[in-house]
Image (cartoon, rainbow, N blue to C red):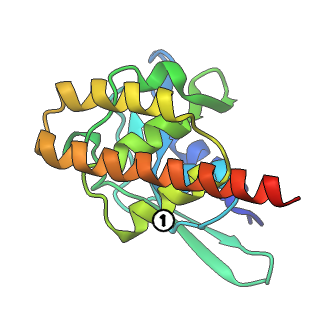
Amino acid sequence: MPTSLEDAVKEMMKKIRERIPAKKECVNVYITGGIAIYFHTASRVSKDLDAIIDQDIAIPSKLKVIWMNKEGHFEELAYDHNYTPTLGIMHEDYDKRAIHLFTIDTKLKVYILAPEDLVISKLSRFGEQDQEDIKRIIQNDLISKNSLERLAKDAINVAGAGRPETLQLHLSLVLEMLDEVSFNFTQNSTKS
């Protein structure tokens, strides 16, 4: 039984790997959402795994992994079949910036979205949890304002989902968060 979220993710990916036919070429999985936030910041344990898979695979309808947390309690990680990147926005080159986590049998490569792409993916819904996730990324100093602004504007310009003015407003709020964290860091540095 897995004893960490990382092990539970690996176990789930092994189960997905079992569904890849022998003759099929290597499949790439890009983990998004709360699990990707966890891998970047070691905070917010999610109960579902959102992923983009670059090829068609028959994933079991109730794919789950049970794991035991540090306190000895059982947790469940479920594959989210309802997740789709088409409901939000995603930069077209997210896969080029994705960070490789591990490979299983040369048939399955597992990545997490880069921090900038995670933030961009959260601009459409921009709910309370999305904003908390974005703050975690900012507080861990994982993104640069210039890079995020450039990539997000590119994504907004080609977005098939959401209203551009709403997406632009959400981006402006994120850029303000970045400025605020930078300002607070500068203030704290000058006090030392």
> Which of the pair 65/39 is nearer the observer?
39
> Which of the pair 3/35 is nearer the observer?
35
Residue 15 is situated, as x and y percent measured from the top left of the image, at 55, 47
Residue 72 is situated, as x and y percent measured from the top left of the image, at 78, 83
Q: Identify residue for label 1.
A: 132
Q: Is residue 152 above or below residue 126?
A: above
Quadrant where the C terminus sits is: bottom right
Which residue extends farthest front?
190
Residue 17 is situated, as x and y percent measured from the top left of the image, at 54, 36
Report which quarter residue 111 is drawn in.
top right
Task: Kindly identify the amino acid type of the residue bearing the numbered disc 1.
Answer: Glu
**Residue drawn 50% across and 35% down?**
145
> How dense is the environment of label 1, judged by Cα within 10 Å: few (below 14), some, or many (20 and up)?
few
Q: Secondary structure at mark 1?
A: helix
Report which quarter residue 155 is drawn in.
top left
* Residue 18 visible in image: no
Relative placement, left or right, of 168 versus 61 is left
Q: Is residue 137 above or below residue 85?
A: below
Residue 86 is situated, as x and y percent measured from the top left of the image, at 21, 40
* Residue 118 visible in image: yes
Relative placement, left or right, of 158 versus 121 is left
**Residue drawn 19% across and 26% down?**
157
**Residue drawn 10% across and 44% down?**
163
Report which quarter residue 175 is drawn in.
top left
